[in-house]
Image (cartoon, rainbow, N blue to C red):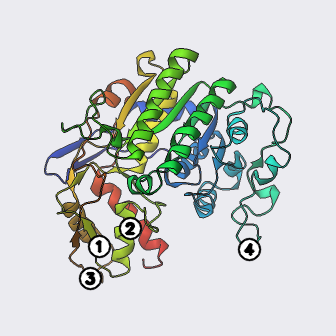
Amino acid sequence: MSAEDDKASTGMGLAGALTPLRASASAYALACAQLKQTPRRWLVTGVAGFIGSHLLETLLLLGQEVRGLDNFLTGHRHNLEQVRASVGEQAWRRFTFIEGDIRDTQACARGCGAPLQAAKAGDAEADNKIDAPDGGSGCCGSMAGRGRADPGGPVAVAASDAVDYVLHQAALGSVSRSLDDPLLCHAVNVSGFLNILAAARDAGVRRFVYAASSATYGDHPALPKVEQHIGAPLSPYALSKYVNELYAQVYARCYAMQTVGLRYFNVFGPRQDPLGAYAAVIPRWIAAMLADESVRIHGDGATSRDFCFVHNAVQANILAATGTDPAAVNQVYNVAVNARTSLTQLHATMQQLLLAARPQHVSRSPHYGEFRPGDVRHSQADIAKAARLLGYVPTHDLAQGLRQTIAWYVAQAGLA
């Protein structure tokens, strides 16, 4: 992914309305240019995950020093391998990896560069070891060629090792998973969030940016969704993400922290995991289509979403971390495109784009099943607040994002 991919684009929204995507001589282009001139130190939690790995890639291409934290519960080593291949060895040397869990306060402290409290012996052993299952070198090869190891251990990290910005992406992000295991959802999404928030406070980070969720809107019926109007949560996951926002507000008031929450709306793109019971709809459907299988749509197909390409989410994170407008801090923002697409429309569009990418593709009709518990019926974001206070302007609509995403999965499957 190019960190300077901020080109002009105008696309027809798949819900039927024209969606202007203004080019920017934009706030994002300016933020990227300033970061190149004055590099900062960043922590990305969930760095081996889908969004986290894209943030890592962009930051390294911008010349930043990045520390990453992940336990590989939902992230993957191969995502880090692909980032390394993309950015090159010189940029990769500016990456420090910590294999750790946000439920572990010591891992959070090491990630943020906060003082360590009686760290257990051996805590550092996992740091920067991204080993293959068979004990091989995994994605990182020899020590000389991988990101630098975090020292860990019982010695306190020097104040100079504190990061400037935290981009907190680590979470269990599935409504259905939270219904199956609400205790795990709470442990990761609430307790883990509080751990990393407290570590960021102790480290004195400049700003704490975190992944919030459109699930917070719950049963509020209005469309498009506006940040100040939310309803009752419909799942443990939705509740956990709302609690994140409340904790961030309290820490801002009580500890003078600068926090920004980003309510993602159905982010998709390359590297999103298509496997498992909790896979998101777009990668799961692409995998099925490439396997010449019919996809399953939960409900009648009229359920709609505001699908957001991952490059848009990366832009929002950079702007949220580096923005200088005091009014933009200690806020939550919608991150989306402000376009609504039904699942039936999504399926038809994906079939068309896949057929364009692979003329031999055979389109198959979807199967419709029961609605899923906890699902929001319709979702569409008002992005005016993010545009006004952050300078956020989506660079990709759904069709543009799908073309890049499908091309990536086709290449990964060796079918190009």
Find the distance from the CA under tag 1 to the CA under tag 4.
34 Å
Residue 303 lies, with reference to residue 201, above or below; the image says below
Mark with earlier residue (2, 4) = 4
Between label 3 and label 2, give the one nearer the viewer.
2
For label 1, the residue is: 295
Residue 54 point in image, percent of width and height:
52, 50
Residues at marks 2 and 1 touching, judged by CB atoms closer than 8 Å: yes
**Mark 1 or 4, nearer chain start:** 4
Rounded to the nearest angstrom, the CA distance separating label 1 from label 3 is 13 Å
In this view of the protein, which residue sits in the foreground, 132 or 219? 219
Q: Position of residue 68 (x, y in %)?
A: 65, 46
Amino acid at pointer 1? Val
Q: Left or right? Give the position of 101 relative to 169.
A: right
The three-letter amino acid code for the residue at tag 2 is Arg
In primary-sequence order, the first of circles 3 and 2 is 2
Say which amino acid is labelled 3. Answer: Val
Pointer 4 residue:
134
Residue 117 located left or right of residue 251 = right
